[in-house]
Amino acid sequence: MFIMDNELKLNEWQFAQRKYLPFEEKLILSRRRIEDWYDFHEGDVYVSFSGGMDSTLLVDLVRKTVGDVPLVFVNTGLEYPEIVRFVSIYDNVTVLRPKMSFKEVLEVHGYPLISKETAAKIRKLRHGNLSARYRNYLLNGDERGSFGKLAEKWKFLVNAPFDISELCCDITKKQPIYAYNKETGRVPYIGITQDEGYRRQREYNRTGCNVYDAKNPKSQPLGFWARQDILRYIAVNNLNICSIYGTIECRNGVFQNTGVYRSGCVYCCMGVQLEPHPNRFERMKSDDYRLYNYCMRPLYENGLGFDYVLNYCGFAH
């Protein structure tokens, strides 16, 4: 029996209560939501599978709960080679590709920098048909304060000699998924967790695990899980994970992995300013110089042009 529950809409205290549940209770609640979603949609579901740790766990949990659900992987051309090889060992996987390559996205829309929120503000200020009031709000805030305005330290990017945009993920990942949903009538399980930023946490607060009444329905049964829960589940169940994550160790009751923290898109610049040395590009330089060279070469030399962009921003690479 599926549950169209009122708790789908969560207050902050309800989310806080849920995210601090004991691990075993989180597991029970997630399985219940997985079953609810499967039953409501009469099995016309799939797991959105990126090859990352969260979605690897989700595949295991969903298939143990409701059976051999199909997987959908979007090969954007931005994944680590190890991720693509890892996904290939799974059965019942549909591989999708975007209509526009990453290089084309850069050339048409601009570079993914800082964060989605910041990149969107910069794109609107550069190219949006904005009212004077809204433009002033983005640059200076309003009578309510400075929340929502572009941070002072990033204002120089409004006049950068290259475009900046948050649209890469929409074009290379979301559009192929939405087209698949429309074509097949299937709806996804997605491995979003509470540690993926304020924006996603806020979204989960509004919807809860199963989003039935939306333009793009989805189930996010791990939405209240923390990274420690993810690592613990993988360790306890001895799950095979992609080699880029290394191994999972438990020291003094705290789980950690020895490889990359998150895989993401190999060329993405978002958040690189927050990383300690060596950051993702410095690691790329030592780990795979072929990829690094392609990433840094100018667009007119059939590269991606990141050397110029990162130098302009003052980011180590």
Image (cartoon, helix red, strand yellow):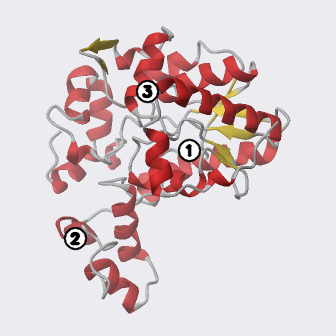
Residue nearer the viewer, 291 or 148 = 148
Mark 2 vs mark 3, foreground winner is 3
Q: Residue at x 43, y 58 (%)?
A: 166
Residue 269 x, y percent position in the rendering: 31, 46
| Mark carried by residue 155 | 2
How many neighbours does mark 3 have within 10 angstroms: few (below 14), some (14-19), or many (20 or more)? some
Q: Which residue is mark 3?
A: 229
Look at the numbered discs 1 and 2 and tell me whether their residues touch, using CB distance below 8 Å. no
User: Which of pointers 3 and 1 lies earlier in the amino acid sequence?
Assistant: 1
How many neighbours does mark 1 have within 10 angstroms: few (below 14), some (14-19), or many (20 or more)? some
The three-letter amino acid code for the residue at tag 1 is Lys
Residue nearer the viewer, 254 or 214 = 254
Residue 139 x, y percent position in the rendering: 28, 79
Quarter in which the N terminus is drawn? top right
Residue nearer the viewer, 278 or 213 = 213
How many neighbours does mark 2 have within 10 angstroms: few (below 14), some (14-19), or many (20 or more)? some
| Mark carried by residue 173 | 1
Look at the numbered discs 2 and 3 and tell me whether their residues touch, using CB distance below 8 Å. no
112 sits to left or right of 251: right
Task: Compute the Cα span from label 3 to label 1.
Answer: 26 Å
Q: Residue at x 29, y 22 (%)?
A: 288
Snapshot quadrant of residue 255? top left
The three-letter amino acid code for the residue at tag 3 is Asp
Secondary structure type for disc 1: helix
Task: Compute the Cα span from label 2 to label 3.
Answer: 38 Å
The three-letter amino acid code for the residue at tag 2 is Lys
Secondary structure type for disc 2: helix
Q: Is residue 93 above or below residue 153?
A: above
